Structures are given as structure tokens and as C-alpha cells.
């Protein structure tokens, strides 16, 4: 039920946020487009004259402060290239203050030199492993560069060191979701939403994280809220339908699929599921129309799905509708059907003949050929055995029923058909034994009812 995992609906929103943040140059402030060096507040924070947080910020001693204020800052205001070269030389020393690498990383980022920025931030962490801002900026940078594993490492480290940033939480949620760590994704989305409660993208991510934990009731409620705010979003209706299926509220799921159908956003798979729900509830004409619509979406649907739909119709006793589905399959897919699929179509046609009472002994050679082609197809063996039984060749039929029983997934079905053949031969004791074994293997109300009827007949004849 649950479909293959997808990326968030609006991943570009996160990337745009990165651009707006200027890669989260957090302590130095968001760098404005205009020259910031005339801004005293920016200069103070840039140099680091504020009181640093213990352990997560390198201390700026008197000598470093003198260098920053009296050498670097004046040069930044007149010749940034020279200032950068001076800072590069100063940061080369393994014993130099990690703040130099941090400042240098910010300068590289401002100039669009992302790989150099990465190297500088990494150097800052080498010198001061718990440098919170360096971990934050590396997380954003690596995410921007598409290195999700390293982004995850630096963001989780930043959170452990005390970072509180809604964008970090949101990106962490996305990264956890991609790794199928849905509990962590849920927690991260909830943390982000504390700071921006009306963010639709994060609510959507939260709803998906909950759905993929199979918390269907909570997911259905969240998608209700999302649909109310954006009823045109097809994915909300689709995923809420998944939640309804998980809750076994199949008619509610059908309602969602009908909405998608009217929006022309229902996938072929959605339509097949909708058709199956209609069959379960006896809406055969509606199911037939939906199945045909699904088949017509050729190229976007595995042909085995409509074949399974035809099989569902046959098992439910609607052979005429099944014939129409098979005809639509042949019309749409034509000669593109491979040998395996063609075999399935032939088998279903034989089943339709059997169920409709239109089969004659002429079909036996065809079934024999199919049995030789695929000797482990229990359905073909059972069909062939049924025809031999009806034709009076019970010995041949028994041999085929036994072969089908030896195929584990067909054992119960073969026993049931064998039991019915024995009833036709008025061998009630043997029939009851076969039918009871069939019911023990695969309990079904229809078998139980038939078994009770045979018992009554057997008693009456004693």
C-alpha cells in the first residue's frame, strides 16, 4: 500500500531559504548586499568582542583582538583581496585561533567560493571541535552542495551543541525522511513548526513522516487540515487515501480517488485500487469503467495490474465484466504483451469459459499445452482437472488435482475443487475429507457453507 518514498513537495523552498540566510552566518548576522564594514554592530560581532559561549566558541584573546581591530578591519575597508590574503597567512598556523578560519570561510562564501569555504570551516572545527557556528555553516553548505550525509552529521552536531534554528530542524527532518528514519523526521518537523506554525511544507513533511510510521489515524487528520488549506494539491488527497486504506476505510479512500479522478490527477494505480473497492462493494459497472480508464493510461501502468483486476472480477463471479477488461487489455496493449502476460490472459479466458459454462472438451488441448508450458501453474492444472472430471475421466482429474496440491500456494484451492468433483461422483465421505482439509488450509466462508451442505446431503443418504 504504501508507495515508494518521494522527496518533499517543495524542496526548492529550502534551497531558497539557504540563499536568503546567506548560509546562516549566524553570529555575524545576515550579510547585507551593501558594504557591511561601515556598520559598527556588524564589525563588533564580526571581530568577536562579544562574550563567547563557553566551549562552543573559541576565545578571542587580546593579541587576536588587536590583530582583528588594528590590522584586518582597516584592510577590509580598503582592500578586501589584501585582507583575505593576510587572513589566509594568519590562519595557516595550526595554533591560530579558529575564529580566523571561520571569518575566512564567511569571506569565501560571500565570494561564491564554496569549496574554499568548506575547507575553512573544516579547519575551524579541527582547531575547535565544538565550534557551533562552523558546524551550522558546514551543514548548510554541504546541503547546498548535495552532500546529504555530511550535512546530516554537522546539523546533528550543531543541535547537540545547542543550536536552535527552525531551518536546521526543517532540513534535518528532510534528511531523516530520505534515510527512512521517520520518527526522527517527525520530531524534527515538529521542532521546526514550533517556530513557524503555519508552514505548509513542514506540515506536509510531518504528515508524511507520520503516515510512513503507519500512524494512519493521525496522518488522516493532518491531511484533512492540509486539504482544507489547499484542496487543489493532488498529493494531499492521494496520501490521505493511503491513510484511509491503512485504517480499512476503503470507501473513504474511494472518495479521495474520485476527487483525484475529477481533477485528472488519478494515477493508473489509483484507478485500479478504486476499481477493486467498487468490486468489493458490488458496484461492478462503476468498477468496469474505472478499470478501462486505468488500462487506457498505457505506458504508465504495469499491465499485470489490470490483469489482476480481471482475475478479481472472475473470482467475484462477474465474468462478463472480466471479459470486457481482457478485451480492453488486448485492444490497448496489442502485440506488446510478452509471453508471460499472454499466458495469464489465456488462462483468465479459460477461467471465464469455465465460470460461464461455455467451455467444451475442445479447450482441453489448449490447457494441456499451457500445462506443459508452465507445469507449476496450479490454476491451469485445476482448470484441466475440472474439465476432465466433467468429461468423466475422474482418474485423470485426480492425478491433476494431486499435482496442484503439491504446489503449496494452490493446495487449498486444489482440495476444494477436488472435493466438488467427488461430490459430483457422489463420493461424499472422500469429498468431506478433501473439503475439510481445504478449509483447514485456507478458511473461507464459501467453503464452510459448501461443506455444511455436503454434510447435510451425506447424513440424509445414510
Image (cartoon, rainbow, N blue to C red):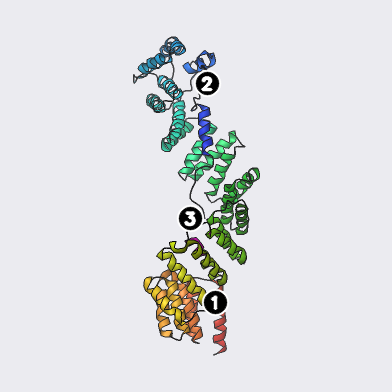
Residue 144's place in the image compared with 233, above or below, is: above
Q: Label 2 vs label 3: CA separation?
A: 50 Å
For label 2, the residue is 33
Q: Label 2 vs label 1: CA separation?
A: 78 Å
For label 1, the residue is 356
Instruction: Please tell me whether mark 3 sits on a helix, a strand or a loop.
Output: loop
146, 172: nearer the viewer: 146
Residue 124's place in the image compared with 153, above or below, is: above
100, 441: nearer the viewer: 100
Q: Quick one: label 2 or label 3, which is nearer the N terminus?
A: 2
Q: Position of residue 295 (x, y in %)?
A: 52, 60
For the residues bearing labels 2 and 1, Cβ distance under 8 angstroms:
no
Res 373 → quadrant: bottom left
Q: Where is residue 71 in the image (x, y as percent from the top left)?
A: 42, 10
Decide if residue 128 is in sight here: no
365, 183: nearer the viewer: 365
Q: Label 3 vs label 1: CA separation?
A: 32 Å
On residue 299, the disc is 3
Decide if residue 144 is in sight here: yes
57, 46: nearer the viewer: 46
Residue 357's place in the image compared with 289, above or below, is: below
> Would residue 451 appear left or right of 252 to someone viewing this image?
left
The segment highlighted magenta reads 296-308
Q: Quick one: label 2 or label 1, which is nearer the N terminus?
A: 2
Residue plotted at (53% across, 51% down): 214
Q: Quick one: label 3 or label 1, which is nearer the N terminus?
A: 3
Instruction: Please tell me whether mark 2 sits on a helix, a strand or a loop.
Output: loop
Amino acid at each position: 500500500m504504501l508507495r515508494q518514498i518521494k522527496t518533499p513537495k517543495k524542496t526548492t523552498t529550502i534551497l531558497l531559504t539557504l540563499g536568503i540566510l546567506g548560509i546562516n552566518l549566524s553570529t555575524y548576522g545576515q550579510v547585507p548586499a551593501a558594504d557591511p564594514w561601515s556598520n559598527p554592530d556588524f564589525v563588533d560581532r564580526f571581530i568577536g568582542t562579544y562574550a563567547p559561549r563557553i566551549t562552543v566558541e573559541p576565545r578571542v584573546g587580546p593579541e587576536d583582538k588587536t590583530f582583528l581591530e588594528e590590522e584586518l578591519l582597516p584592510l577590509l575597508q580598503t582592500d578586501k583581496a589584501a585582507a583575505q590574503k593576510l587572513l589566509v597567512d594568519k590562519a595557516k598556523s595550526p595554533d591560530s585561533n579558529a575564529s580566523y578560519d571561520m571569518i575566512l570561510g564567511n569571506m569565501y562564501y560571500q565570494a561564491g567560493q564554496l569549496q574554499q569555504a568548506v575547507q575553512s570551516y573544516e579547519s575551524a572545527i579541527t582547531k575547535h571541535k565544538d565550534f557551533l557556528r562552523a558546524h551550522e555553516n558546514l551543514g548548510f553548505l554541504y546541503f547546498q552542495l548535495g552532500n546529504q550525509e555530511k550535512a546530516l552529521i554537522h546539523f546533528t552536531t550543531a543541535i547537540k551543541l545547542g543550536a536552535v534554528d527552525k531551518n536546521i530542524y526543517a532540513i534535518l527532518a528532510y534528511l531523516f525522511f530520505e534515510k527512512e528514519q521517520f520518527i526522527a523526521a517527525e520530531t524534527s518537523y515538529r521542532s521546526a513548526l514550533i517556530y513557524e506554525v503555519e508552514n505548509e511544507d513542514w506540515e506536509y513533511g510531518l504528515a508524511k513522516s507520520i503516515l510512513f510510521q503507519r500512524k494512519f489515524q493521525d496522518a488522516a487528520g493532518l491531511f484533512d487540515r492540509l486539504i482544507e488549506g489547499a484542496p487543489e494539491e493532488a498529493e494531499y488527497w492521494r496520501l490521505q487515501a493511503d491513510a484511509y486504506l491503512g485504517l480499512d476505510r476503503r470507501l473513504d479512500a474511494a472518495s479521495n480517488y474520485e476527487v483525484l479522478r475529477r481533477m485528472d490527477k488519478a494515477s493508473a494505480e489509483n484507478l485500479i485500487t478504486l476499481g477493486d473497492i467498487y468490486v468489493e462493494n458490488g458496484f461492478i459497472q462503476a468498477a468496469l469503467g474505472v478499470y478501462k480508464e486505468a488500462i487506457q493510461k498505457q505506458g504508465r501502468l504495469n499491465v499485470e495490474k489490470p490483469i489482476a483486476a480481471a482475475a478479481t472480477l472472475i473470482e467475484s463471479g462477474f465474468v462478463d465484466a472480466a471479459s470486457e477488461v481482457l478485451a480492453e487489455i488486448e485492444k490497448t496493449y496489442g502485440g506488446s504483451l510478452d509471453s508471460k502476460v499472454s499466458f495469464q490472459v489465456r488462462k483468465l479466458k479459460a477461467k471465464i469459459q469455465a465460470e460461464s459454462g461455455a467451455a467444451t472438451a475442445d479447450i482441453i488441448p489448449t490447457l494441456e499445452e499451457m500445462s506443459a508450458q508452465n507445469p507449476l501453474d496450479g490454476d491451469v492444472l485445476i482448470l484441466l482437472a475440472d474439465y476432465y472430471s466433467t468429461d468423466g475421466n475422474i482418474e485423470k482429474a485426480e492425478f491433476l488435482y494431486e499435482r496442484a496440491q503439491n504446489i503449496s500456494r494452490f493446495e487449498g484451492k486444489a482440495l476444494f475443487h477436488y472435493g466438488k468433483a467427488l461430490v459430483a461422483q457422489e463420493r461424499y465421505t472422500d469429498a468431506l475429507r478433501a473439503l475439510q482439509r481445504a478449509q483447514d488450509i485456507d478458511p473461507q466462508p464459501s467453503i464452510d457453507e459448501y461443506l455444511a451442505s455436503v454434510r447435510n446431503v451425506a447424513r440424509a443418504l445414510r
